[in-house]
Amino acid sequence: MLFDVADTIVAVASPPGPGRRGIVRLSGNDAWTIALAGFEAHTPQPLPVRAEMREGRLRVDGVRATLPALLALWPAPRTYTRQPLAEIHVPGAVPLVRQVLAHCLARGARHAEPGEFTLRAFLSGRLDLTRAEAVLGVIDAQSPAQLDAALRQLAGGIATPITALRDHLLDVLAHLEANLDFSEEPDVDLLGRSALADDLARSSRELAALAQRLRGRDRPSGDPKVVLVGPPNTGKSRLFNALVGDARAIVSPVAGTTRDYLSALADCAGLRVELIDTAGIETGDGDIEQQAQSHRSAQADSADLLLVCSSVDIDSPHAVFDRPVLRVWTKGDLAPAPPGYLATSAATGEGLDALRGAIAAMIRRQVAEDDLPSGTGPRCSASLTSASEALGSASQVLTLGGGDELVAIDLRQAIDELGKVVGATVTDDILDRIFRRFCIGK
Ligand SMILES: Nc1nc2c(ncn2[C@@H]2O[C@H](COP(=O)(O)OP(=O)(O)OP(=O)(O)O)[C@@H](O)[C@H]2O)c(=O)[nH]1
Ligand SMILES: [Mg+2]
């Protein structure tokens, strides 16, 4: 999907629908000429050398009166795309904005594809790939925590340490390759080799850990997933209804009421989460029970947080979870919570706010640790894993006294994979995956 960067592109940059102001954005060599066509400034001036906002009136094809308009002009190369950039601001009526867009198209601009402004920023070296994704994260952010992560990434995120590691590996490779040219005898620098082996093994472990953290963070909805599990009849469904604020799930004293899983969005102290109610944990072997259990396992396995519910003070025999867990005591109005449980009662509402706060705190902590908006994670984790494996292998070859040329092959692969993460090694496929998720005008 690579587009010609020589085209001047145009798109509506204000949010869709009526608003106070409609903004049409242009980037490319003809951006200014097109934006200035039909524009009469209140105080005519020569073309600016610095970013400038001008007031005036705009005559647009198909609109009889002239429109009050603001024109913003940014000279290259100090712009987002490093190309001449212009914005036309008019009153935010939908038909007017559409006319202004048509006006620009008629003068030779091409309609921008989704993310094409940011793609140009990336292609011109203005942003690395993880930062381009951060822009997407900022646009997509649906909760303060997601916005935080996206903004942090925009400020550097994982790109900085990975670029540093890649530079270091490039140095090591250059050193090895310099030796390769005239090494008749095996390298005698044994001490250097074992230090290098340790160094590469450590980097390999760090990359593996980072890849592990990033894996599985790309949920289609982008909302953290919080799953209710626990024995039958503990009050999971009633708690689910209380947190969602809607009587969606069937609640009854009959054990085994919930069979399918239910999903709804809930607000936890300002954080939007996807809450899932599941069938009680039991060991029935009928077909329906089996299906209910497999639904439950699938949901629990993909959870960002498990709410393990109990209303009787015994930990279920299935109490081993490899997801983050919050232990919730249900029916707190009937019996006091044992230590280690967060007491709640869906009947009286007791402890629900505390539970919402605890959910938000745990999810926020995870997001902060991962430091990345969703989308970056899955793309990068595959490359980080390959890089980690290649470095592990390089370290092993060194330890076993293998030839430098073998080490160099592994190093080159690791450098390539790290390059994909920060965009130093780019394939169309990567660009396509990232930029087609943008909205038009960004
Ligand atoms: N007193 C009291 N009763 C509750 C509370 N929460 C749930 N119950 C009752 O406990 C019974 C079971 O509640 P459910 O929410 O259906 O339990 P569940 O865990 O979803 O059960 P399954 O779907 O069968 O696994 C119902 O009769 C609820 O009214 C509570 O906080 N206090
Ligand atoms: Mg239920």
Image (tube, grey):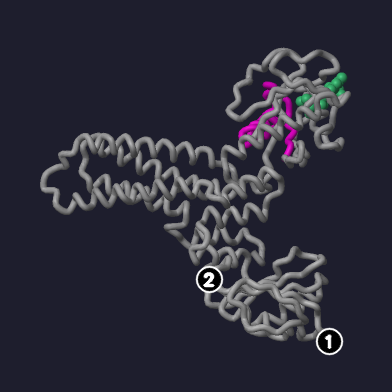
Please name the amino acid that badge 1 sits on.
Answer: Arg
Mark 2, Cα crowd under 10 Å, few <14 / some 14-19 / many 20+, is few
Q: Position of residue 333 (x, y in %)?
A: 85, 17
Please name the amino acid that badge 2 sits on.
Answer: Pro
Residue 341 in view: yes
Q: Position of residue 266 (x, y in %)?
A: 78, 39
Disc assigned to residue 77:
2
Q: Which residues are magenta?
A: 274-303
Which one is in front, 441 or 331? 441
Q: On the rendered image, what quadrant is the N terminus found in?
A: bottom right
Magenta segment includes 212: no
Q: Residue at x 74, y 78 (%)?
A: 100
Which quadrant would residue 385 be assigned to in this image? Answer: top left
Residue identified by numbered label 1: 64
Q: Residue at x 59, y 81 (%)?
A: 30
Secondary structure found at label 1? loop
**Relative vertical location of residue 326 with respect to residue 123 in this rendering, above or below:** above
